[in-house]
């Protein structure tokens, strides 16, 4: 009994140590900083945030971008996952598609965001080709707008959705679809009543991942906004990097965390109720 | 309950792992400086001559000024960094944080040539010496703008609408640049409302956080005029891009990369020698040639090609630079950042 307990302790100690050192301790540091000011306990950092419409506007921008990114990623990612899992017959081609999908994840966000800055700029490829085709007369402004940030975030986060949905689709037992067809359901009706509900866990986990990454993203919004649109992560960075107010910055970080968790909890509640 | 005690003992194990990170010292000097071409230049111009002279190896600890300050604060009880390069502004914060050791210039023969402005004092003690000046000047695309603009007012020129950049408050030059504009527009430090009204009118393409983002925007043609550092602007021009840098009639705001001795360093003698090497005319000349840093020592001879690219421009000197009192800037940092967020960045 005691030897097995020691063995369990040994096995759990390393991951728990890792978790404590790299997650709990930093998070606790931020949390403690957020409730301190000039050496004493206070809620002032939070009231400063919550009783100020400016912060609510920034939160709204952040979550609007997060939600739109999630919705667009799912709308684009689902057909893509479907194509990869259900339509590609040739194995090598599927492998190439997956590699193409994952490859960008190996380059840094910064490089990819700079890439979009080149594409979306005043003289960028997008504007030049639209001007060349006579679609527009003056370059459209993408950089420094929410649209620009949205394009960058969708591009960076799309692979996560495709992978989780693709995984869920691959697990769907094809015999239940065949049964549905045998019972006279049309392919569309089979999809909506059988396949899609079975793939929902993949959609939900992809959506949660994308949403959490989108609302906490710093590099992409910072570069593509050109400092003209502000999301919460940029305010946090500003406090830590240039104002050095770790108390207010910490409170901003905890606020973002709390709102994100609340949104995710609400979403999973809705999806659980919907599943009933 | 059992699982809780298991978790707790695991966390204790984790904490002991974290706190036992200190390492032993040997005949080696650890110097904190910046990344990229800055770090390379400090390596070639200061560290290599220092090693040649003293036989002491230099280990570089790479990070921005802010990161270095954070490291110094964390290591306050047992520092592993002996000498730290930090920019003006952060330098004063480090002094306030009490992580610096006083610099005794009488032990350093090369200090005789240091210009008076370049030794920064708190009370009677020197806490930093300048390693070279750089400025935030008017940078423009020479293909789009043929003649060098003579005034900062060019940023508001209708021809360049939507293609202008200036630093954001997240950049180390952001807040000082607001001070600079405020002075130029005749505002007082107490009332900057006119300056913010003017900033609101600016049709900017972007407000840059990092100087790399500014360089990138000038390179791609996204931006054709703006405030950029002489170091970055001339690096673009040297790479063959149509970029010019000019010192307008209102002058330029400037700051410097400074050297500091770290309090509690076990290699203080070697660290003092390092500072002495950094103040040599050769080091000043080398940094001017590589980064166009304006030398802080008086006896540096430069070629005309290098001279014209220095922070004070073709005809100027160190006296033309507007070096603000960083303590004044730091005191207003939080308030101005907030005003900027509400008035400009939306």
Image (cartoon, rainbow, N blue to C red):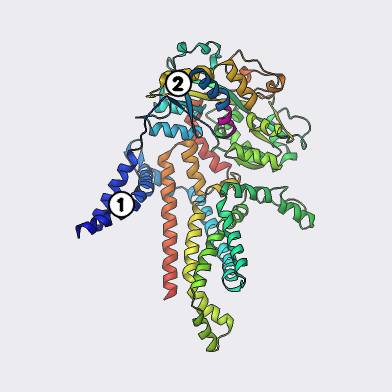
Q: Is residue B340 magenta?
A: no
Q: Residue at x 25, y 58 (%)?
A: B3
**Label 2: which residue?**
B271
Residue B24 rendering spot, x and y as whole percentages: 36, 30
| Residue A103, quarter of picture | bottom right
Q: Which one is in front, A164 or A142?
A: A164
As drawn, the residue found furthest toward the bottom would be: A183
Q: Is residue A143 visible?
A: no
Chain label for disc 1: A
- Magenta residues span B36-42
**Label 1: which residue?**
A13
Of helix, strand and loop, which one carries label 1?
helix
As drawn, the residue found furthest toward the left would be: A2
Residue B292 rendering spot, x and y as whole percentages: 64, 25
- In screen coordinates, is A150 left or right of A168? right
- The dominant secondary structure in magenta is helix
Mark 2 packing: few (<14 Cα in 10 Å), some, or many (20+)? many
Of helix, strand and loop, which one carries label 2?
helix
């Amino acid at each position: 009994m005691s030897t097995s307990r020691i063995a369990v302790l040994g096995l759990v100690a390393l991951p728990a140590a890792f978790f404590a050192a790299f997650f709990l301790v930093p998070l606790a540091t931020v949390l403690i900083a957020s409730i301190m000011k000039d050496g004493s306990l206070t809620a002032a950092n939070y009231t400063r945030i919550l009783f100020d419409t400016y912060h609510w506007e920034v939160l709204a921008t952040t979550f609007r971008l997060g939600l739109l990114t999630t919705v667009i990623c799912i709308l684009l990612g689902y057909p893509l996952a479907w194509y990869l899992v259900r339509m590609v017959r040739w194995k090598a081609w599927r492998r190439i598609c997956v590699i193409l999908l994952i490859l960008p994840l190996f380059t840094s966000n910064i490089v990819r965001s700079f890439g979009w800055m080149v594409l979306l700029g005043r003289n960028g490829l997008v504007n030049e080709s639209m001007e060349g085709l006579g679609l527009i007369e003056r370059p459209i402004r993408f950089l420094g707008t929410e649209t620009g940030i949205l394009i960058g975030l969708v591009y960076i986060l799309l692979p996560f959705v495709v992978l989780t949905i693709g995984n869920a689709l691959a697990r769907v037992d094809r015999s239940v679809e065949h049964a549905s067809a045998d019972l006279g359901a049309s392919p569309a009706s089979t999809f909506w009543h059988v396949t899609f509900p079975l793939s929902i866990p993949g959609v939900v986990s992809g959506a949660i991942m994308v949403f959490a990454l989108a609302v906490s993203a710093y590099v992409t919004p910072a570069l593509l906004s050109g400092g003209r649109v502000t999301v919460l992560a940029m305010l946090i960075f500003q406090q830590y990097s240039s104002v050095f107010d770790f108390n207010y910055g910490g409170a901003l970080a905890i606020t973002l965390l709390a709102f994100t968790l609340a949104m995710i909890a609400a979403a999973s509640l809705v999806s659980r109720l919907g599943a009933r | 309950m059992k699982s809780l005690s298991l978790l707790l003992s695991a966390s204790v194990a984790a904490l002991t792992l974290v706190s036992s990170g200190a390492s032993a010292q040997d005949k080696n000097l650890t110097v904190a400086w910046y990344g990229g071409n800055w770090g390379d230049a400090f390596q070639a111009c200061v560290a290599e001559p220092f090693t040649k002279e003293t036989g002491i190896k230099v280990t570089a600890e790479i990070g921005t000024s802010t990161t270095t300050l954070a490291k110094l604060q964390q290591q306050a009880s047992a520092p592993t960094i002996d000498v730290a390069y930090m920019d003006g502004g952060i330098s004063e914060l480090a002094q306030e944080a009490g992580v610096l050791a006083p610099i005794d210039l009488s032990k350093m023969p090369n200090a005789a040539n240091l210009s008076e402005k370049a030794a920064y004092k708190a009370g009677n003690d020197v806490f930093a010496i300048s390693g070279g000046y750089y400025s935030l000047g008017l940078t423009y695309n020479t293909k789009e703008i043929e003649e060098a603009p003579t005034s900062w007012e060019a940023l508001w020129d209708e021809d360049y609408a939507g293609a202008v950049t200036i630093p954001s408050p997240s950049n180390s030059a952001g807040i000082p640049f607001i001070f600079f504009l405020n002075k130029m527009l005749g505002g007082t430090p107490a009332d900057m409302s006119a300056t913010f009204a003017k900033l609101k009118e600016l049709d900017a393409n972007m407000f840059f956080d990092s100087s790399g983002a500014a360089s990138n925007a000038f390179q791609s043609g996204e931006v054709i005029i703006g405030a950029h550092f002489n170091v970055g602007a001339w690096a673009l021009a040297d790479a063959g891009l149509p970029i010019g840098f000019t010192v307008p009639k209102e002058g330029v705001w400037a700051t410097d990369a400074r050297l500091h001795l770290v309090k509690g360093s076990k290699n203080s003698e070697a660290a003092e020698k390092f500072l002495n090497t950094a103040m040599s005319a050769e080091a000043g000349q080398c940094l001017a040639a590589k980064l166009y840093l304006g030398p802080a020592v008086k006896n540096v001879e430069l070629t005309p090609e290098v001279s014209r690219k220095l922070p004070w421009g073709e005809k100027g000197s160190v006296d033309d630079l507007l070096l603000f009192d960083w303590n004044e800037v730091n005191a207003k940092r939080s308030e101005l950042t907030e005003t900027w967020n509400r008035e400009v960045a939306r």
